[in-house]
Each structure stands twice: as structure tokens, then as C-alpha cells.
Image (spheres, rainbow, N blue to C red):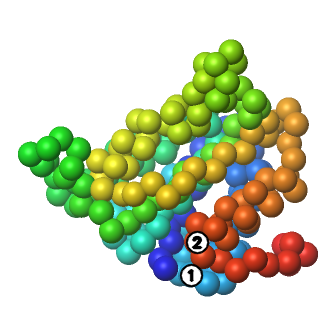
Amino acid sequence: MNILIINGYQSHPFCKGELNFSLLNIMLNKLRKQHQVQLSSVEDYNVMDERNKFFWADLIIFQFPIYWFNVPGKLKLYMDQVFEYGQFYTFADEYGSGGLLKDKSYILSTTWNAPEEVFNHPDKFFEGKSVDDLFIPFHKTMEFCGLNHQGTLSFHNVVKAPNFEGYRQKLEHFLNNKCGLEETDASNF
């Protein structure tokens, strides 16, 4: 399988992206053992090269931290510049059905300072909403381009109470299930 990983991290003086880069390294180390993998960054890219990577890929993984309950600004700009009419989508008789990347899938992987317990509970901050509920615009953008959602992975409480070992295990288990990888000994990382 051809896999494109998009690093949606946008640099900030107060957020160095250590967890984001660690998760990317785990993805790269695991996935490269059995698949062809390319990595892109929203900090530095060529629009035409990025379009070609999407055409090449079977699976696209978006990895990014949450900034103000949304994607980083540079990830939004990346999508605005790369997702081209006539290549990623066209207008169809039925609105939203003109996606041209129908043979491709995507995974959403995010890091949050929000604790996990504030999701999916009607009396908490997100009023019963899940991560996927909050990312309906992102999911609809992907659907508009024809991509199929293969899962969402989210890591929580990453600033106040980080648990890197738990995050690593969760990511490895997710990749094993979604990307058909064989289980490996954790000591290899």
C-alpha cells in the first residue's frame, strides 16, 4: 500500500511539537516495514508535488495538534492550495458526489490538551460531542474529494498529563488494525 502522511504541525514558540513528531516517527518506523510511505509537511511544500503524492497514495494519514478546536492554520492553507478543482473534485448533479479520489482513504490522528472525559458526555465542555462530531467540516471536505474515512485516532491531555507510553501503544494498535501490520515487540522502538 502507498501511504502519505501529512504532518499538519504548525510551529509556535509555546508549542514545540515533540509529541506530534514522536507520533510521526512511530508511524514512519512501523509503516515503512510493510508499505511505501511518503511524508509531507504543511511548513514547507510544493503544491504540484503534493497533488502528485495524493494521486500516488492509497491511504492519507493527517497527523496534527489541535489549535483552538480546529486544524492548524497552515493545514487549512495546505488544503486550500492543494485540493484542486478538476483533480480532486468536480461538480456533480448531486451535491458532494463529485469527488475524484474515490479509490483512496484517510485517517485522522490528532493531539489535544483537552482530557478525553470532556467528549461524549452531555454535561461536559463539548456537550456530548465526539472528536469526529467536532471535525464534521474536515470529514465533509475529505468526502467532497471522494476519500473514505478509515478511522480517527485522538490523544488527550497531552500538556497537563501526558502519557507517552499509552499514546505509543494506542497508535501501534491502531496502525496494526487499520494498516494490516503485524504486531511487533514494543522493545523495537
Number of residue marks = 2
Question: At x 58% / y 71%, what residue is drawn?
Answer: 179
User: Callout 1, which amino acid?
Assistant: His
Secondary structure beneath label 2:
loop
Give the CA distance from mark 1 to mark 2: 9 Å
Viewer can see residue 68: no
Q: Nearer the viewer, mark 1 or mark 2?
A: 2
Question: At x 69% / y 18%, what residue is drawn?
Answer: 124
Q: Position of residue 60 (x, y in %)?
A: 48, 63
Q: Which mark is residue 179?
A: 2
Mark earlier in primary sequence (1, 2): 1
The quarter of the image holding the C terminus is bottom right
Q: Which residue is mark 1?
A: 35
From the viewer's perspective, is residue 54 above or below residue 99? below
Q: Nearer the viewer, residue 61 or 83?
A: 61
Find out whether the residues at labels 1 and 2 contact each other: C-beta distance under 8 Å: yes
- Other-residue count near label 2 (Cα within 10 Å), few / some / many at <14 / 14–19 / ≥20: some
User: Callout 2, which amino acid?
Assistant: Cys
**Relative side of 114 to 68, left or right:** right
**Relative side of 133 to 157, left or right:** left
Viewer can see residue 84: yes
Q: Position of residue 104 (x, y in %)?
A: 38, 66
Q: Position of residue 113 (x, y in %)?
A: 74, 33
Q: Position of residue 160 (x, y in %)?
A: 85, 32
Please identify the residue farthest to the bottom as the structure is shown: 34
Question: At x 49% / y 79%, what residue is drawn?
Answer: 1
- Other-residue count near label 1 (Cα within 10 Å), few / some / many at <14 / 14–19 / ≥20: some
Secondary structure beneath label 1:
loop
From the viewer's perspective, is residue 7 above or below residue 178? above
* Picture quadrant where residue 89 is located: bottom left
